[in-house]
């Protein structure tokens, strides 16, 4: 039974990837590290800010990561007026609240940027928990962020569903024991399915709690079939 739905933020709740890429490009230029569009693909795969900074700038101290992270977040705030909600997300959140299903955000983004975005879009009160890259030592695909989020919601991961738009996020959710639906934005549906997405959608328009329950049920059917096969049953 579905008891919780957990959303990644960038590319799932908001269409922020263009602003996110541009903020990183502008920041990296200021520190003498111009990057190509291909290199910037690295920032879109659910990584923590510290991992991105070290990838582009090498070994950095904790103080440097904090200072550079604040500078990058300021560039994002300047760009974020261009971000918009993924179609249908507020309607789905309203459905989930009506039927008493818990909701949360699990993002590798920083706490300050995440809070800024949710406040700006008046979404903060829509979620029962918000877990960010500040709350985990390892970013996605490490499953820690989903395990922590489920603990905060007091829900077994088996009864939770995640929405992700990146391969690393899908791997993290599945490794934590959640069902995962992929949003095909910057990555192809085939790539998301190959990563383990149980279903792929373009956005949330027309998506209902009944449909989410059906995705959860198919996971249960697969588990039952696997158990029967292990006992030598004929399917």
Image: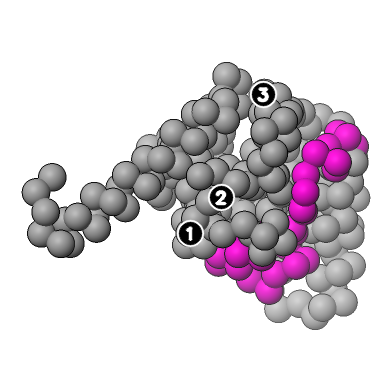
**Which span of residues is magenta-colored?**
120-149
13 on left or right of 70: left
Q: Give x and y (percent) for residue 95.
A: 68, 28
- Mark 1, residue position: 177
Query: Residue 117 placed where, x, y %?
Result: 84, 42
- In the picture of the structure, the residue carrying the numbered disc 2 is 160
Helix, strand or loop at mark 1: loop
Q: How far across and down, in percent of the image, does residue 6 sit?
A: 64, 47
Splitting the image into 4 quarters, where does residue 155 fall? bottom right
**CB atoms of marks 3 and 1 within 8 Å:** no
Near mark 1 (Cα within 10 A), the count class, few <14, some 14-19 or many ≥20, is some
Question: Residue under circle 3?
Answer: 88
Color theme of the render: one colour
Q: Residues within 10 Å of mark 2 (few under 14, many from 20)?
A: many
Q: Is the C terminus in the top left, top right, bottom left or bottom right quadrant?
A: top left
Which residue sits at x=48%, y=48%? 179
State the separation of the CA atoms marked 3 and 1. 26 Å
Query: Looking at the image, is 158 positioned above or below residue 56?
Result: above
């Amino acid at each position: 039974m579905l008891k919780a739905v957990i959303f990644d933020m960038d590319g799932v709740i908001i269409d922020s990837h263009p602003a996110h890429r541009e903020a990183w490009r502008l920041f990296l230029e200021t520190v003498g590290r111009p990057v190509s569009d291909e290199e910037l693909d690295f920032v879109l795969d659910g990584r923590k800010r510290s991992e991105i900074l070290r990838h582009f700038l090498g070994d950095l101290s904790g103080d440097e990561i904090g200072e550079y992270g604040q500078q990058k977040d300021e560039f994002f705030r300047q760009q974020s007026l261009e971000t918009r909600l993924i179609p249908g997300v507020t309607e789905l959140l309203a459905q989930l609240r009506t039927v008493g299903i818990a909701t949360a955000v699990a993002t590798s983004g920083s706490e300050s940027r995440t809070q800024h975005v949710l406040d700006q879009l008046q979404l903060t009160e829509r979620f029962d928990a918000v877990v960010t890259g500040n709350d985990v030592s390892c970013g996605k695909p490490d499953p820690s962020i989903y395990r922590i989020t489920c603990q905060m919601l007091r829900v077994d991961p088996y009864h939770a569903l995640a929405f992700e738009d990146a391969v690393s996020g899908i791997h993290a959710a599945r490794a934590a024991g959640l069902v995962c639906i992929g949003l095909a934005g910057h990555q192809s549906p085939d790539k998301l399915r190959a990563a383990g997405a149980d279903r792929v959608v373009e956005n949330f328009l027309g998506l209902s709690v009944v449909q989410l329950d059906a995705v959860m049920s198919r996971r249960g059917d697969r588990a039952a079939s696997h158990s029967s096969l292990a006992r030598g049953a004929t399917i």
